[in-house]
Amino acid sequence: METAFDFCVLLLLLEYSEKLEKMDINDANLDALANHLRQTLAPDVAIRKPAEHFLMSVETNTNYAILLLNLIARENVDLTVRVAGAITFKNFVKRNWKIEEDERDKIDLKDRNAVKQLIVNLMVKSPEVIQRQLSDAISVIGREDFPEKWPNLLGELVEKFGTGDLSVINGILQTAHSLFKRYRYEFKSDKLWKEIKFVLDNFAEPLTQLLIALMGLTKQYANDNNAQKVVYNSVLLVMKIFSSLNCQDLPEYFEDNMQVWMQTFENLLETNVPALQSATDEEAGVMEQIKSQICENIGMYAQKYDEEFYKYLPVFVKSVWNLLVSTSLQSKYDSLVSNAIKFLAIVADKDKNKEIFAESNTLSQICQNVIIPSMEFRESDEELFEDNPEEYIRRDIEGSDLDTRRRAACDLIRSLSRHFEQQMTTVFGQYVQVMLTKYAENPAQNWKNKDVAIYLVTSLAAKGQTQKQGITKTNQLVNVTDFYQSHVLCDLASDNISELPVLKADAIKYVMIFRNQLPPAVVKQTFPYLIKLVKSENPVVHTYAACAIEKILLVKQADNFAMVRSEDLATVAQDLLSNLFGALALPASKENDHVMKAIMRSLSTLQTAIVPFAGQLISQLTNILVLVARNPSKPHFNHYLFESLSLVVRYVCKQNPQAVSDFEVALFPIFQQILQQDVAEFIPYVFQIFALTLDFNPNGISEAYMSLFPFLLAPVLWDKQGNIHPLVRLLRSYISKGSQLIVQTGKLGAILGVFQKLIASKVNDHEGFLLIQSVVEHMSPEAIHPSITDVFRLLFQRLQSSKTVKFSKNLITFFCFYVIKFGAPAFIQVIASIQENMFAMVLDRIMIPDLQKISDPKDKKICAVGVTKILCEAPDTFSGAYRNYWGTLLQSLIGLFELPEESADVEDEHFAEIDESAGYQAAYSHLAFSGKDESDILKGQIPDVKLYLAASLHSLSIANPGEVGTVIATIARPAQDYLTKYLQVANIQLV
Ligand SMILES: *[C@@H]1O[C@H](CO)[C@@H](O)[C@H](O)[C@H]1NC(C)=O
Ligand SMILES: *[C@@H]1O[C@H](CO)[C@@H](O)[C@H](O)[C@H]1NC(C)=O
């Protein structure tokens, strides 16, 4: 088949021309590589960047990986260069080892095999810094190849246990740990379970034997501190591997050998090796890490395998309890204490363990000796608050994974409250009173008492909490509003915003997490206070205030609208915006995510009320953009910055379309720089904002946009997945704004070239459909006519080579789209011109069987109208060549109508959240506020598709008296009844 779009030929040439260089292993090449690696360490960007770019550009050359491994192995090369090599190798593996769907394999098979042969031996004999990188690389490779394509890996690892060399054993354990740790969070599947089984069959017994040997060595080396340290490090890794191997299900092997492991756990929990204590207060020593991991392991057993574990429970509760009461407050014990408390929380949560805690004495002991001490605001917390606010915030409100004592104590309170709500509330209620009284005696001195009181009330009151909603369920015994009025409001409202910052932060946090429980009027009243607190110089305080503002702007009322409206906010907009931007001017908060997010949400609430501030906003935002573009480092901050820019452009231009040229003047020079300097992180955003300004431009495609156009077709841009949606979005804006200009200047071919590339890919075919729909929607028949057969051919070709459900759905929608634009007869004619009888195949193999798979409400509507037109407006379908399909197609259409609706309540974009967990750039950089780019092919003319079908059938019956009813009488039962109903509702009788 011949389809000639020049652009595609160009693409292919470019892809293959770069693979010419040879990378033999020789001194010259090794030296050159070492040199480039050394340059990647240079502080000067002008040296570093080109070196990084160069290495990336040659990394898919044959032999590159082997050359790199050879360099890493050379002991006479600088260690820093070897480490840089190991990191580069790891990143290379991360980028390229996995073969992405519909991408070609970028690594030679020979290289793949050579890497797998070399890497384990290289890893074990390398210094620890390199070992760590290589062992990560092994786990990335293992993720793809283990066990099927790397069956001897495990054997190779186990074999080295026998060497007795502790540094080798450590390396092996480290690797095994990185290889197996994904079992902890991956979903159950047959494949995963097979892999774990393979690992258990080959690894569980050697691991157990190794543990026994290691425990022996701890005695043997009792007087050699260095050796002990190495041995215990290995023990720690064994404890971690135990966790990975046991987390999906209880393996038979470990069930049979539980006694050995549990006995060892118990011994270790009671072992103290003073020599292995860390010297500082912050850093946990290896023994603490081991005990902490053991608490996690037994917590897991208590949680998941409680029957098998039950007989060990009393012993462990006792030793964990002893551990807790004998551990002091230094932060190096935090993880240990929090895992130990978590273990108790898990035990307390189970109904059948209730008795263990039932005595009121036990309960108050736990409260006094475990919970209260863990709640204390310690010196180290205060230091964190002052010196490392970012970390403080992360731990306190961002739900960092890091375990804190406070959080674990909260969990314990929650578990115990399930069974003993009344008692817990009484015990702590008294305690809270004591704390508050102490505070009242001397606030300046005793503020930490109030901090604990607030924390306790919060933990007691909050029975359920989510990141999105804050608190969702509260304890009936605690009156949240009452406590707010009596003890929180005063800190929030105090005139001196610099005083007692920790209590200010606590007060803000209280409002923030109870925003859905406090009466709306109360929450609204906090706004002026919060705006004022954004001015606090303390980073925690102004961050919390911004964060609270942002979250309150998202609170919905019962009617699903936001509680705070544009008009509510407009009166305070001046202060709000100037305080938020003021916070960004403070050095500690230059790229503060929360503040930027609050700006975004405020603009989204204000909508057109931002117009008076437009000039000021645009200059503030562009100044920030110029700064961050030099070195984009905080993805969330940058994302909210671009969202904010979109909002300003949108709402200002909505009010005054002519203003778009002011934005173009302000933004284009910066955007141009971003493109020229290839600031990859920002490029997808820039395209989306270009699309937005172009959409608003009342004068269509100006000179500036025209000169950008050729650049948009550069293949390198399309190679980055993250650019594809934004580029398609932008091309669609070009098409809708200036279809004639595109045709006149001969650029349609290039657009179709892009279409061809997209449609060939399973990942991006839907983008190809979006593009071609725009072409069909906005271009005249004359413009499209010369290429349309080729377009259809390409679609059929793809259908034949790899049909997917997604592709079929998109294809049907596109067909219907085409029918709506050009009419059913024209559509049938194009298809028939490709091959005789092709249209019958389309009906039989695609439309009729797959129509009901369409689920998107907008697509469903397009298909409903398109198929109705095919049924009723093309003579061939009812009475001509295709009449045999008419009844089944109609039946399929009725099926589409009667399928359960997919929920259509799309959330208003004001409530949009970026997906915090999304790993890839692609999903990540979509700007929610850059406007919708939906086509409007139906122009709102068909409100009810069932009525439309009834009316169309009526017209058809007039042209074919008596016949339509006869055919309908032959279609299957439920469909026929539905149709009768549509006709009744429409009050139509077929002729
Ligand atoms: C909680 O306290 C507030 C303010 O003191 C009061 O108006 C409200 O009735 C109390 N709610 C309950 C459920 O007791
Ligand atoms: C506000 O509180 C700070 C810190 O306690 C204190 O240094 C300052 O003098 C207070 N300002 C006023 C006006 O009271």
Image: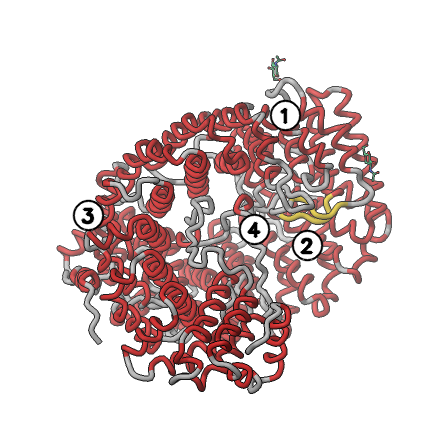
- In the picture, the disc for residue 222 is none
Foreground mark, 4 or 3, reads 4
Q: Residue at x 75, y 24 (%)?
A: 439
Q: CA distance from mark 4 to mark 2?
A: 39 Å
Q: CA distance from mark 4 to mark 3?
A: 53 Å
- Label 2 packing within 10 angstroms: few (<14), some (14-19), many (20+): many
Q: Residue 875: image x %, image y %?
A: 40, 78
Identify residue for label 1.
Answer: 529
User: CB atoms at circles 4 and 3 under 8 Å apart?
Assistant: no
- Label 3 packing within 10 angstroms: few (<14), some (14-19), many (20+): few
Most foreground residue, 579 or 386 = 579
Residue 631 image-quadrant placement: top left
921 up-or-down from 180: above or below:
above
Ranked by sequence position, the earlier of labels 4 and 2 is 2
Q: CA distance from mark 1 to mark 3?
A: 57 Å
Amino acid at dot 3:
Asn
Which quarter of the rendered image does ligand 1 occupy?
top right
Identify residue for label 3.
Answer: 35
Foreground mark, 4 or 1, reads 4
247 up-or-down from 476: above or below:
below
Q: Residue 515: image x %, image y %?
A: 67, 39
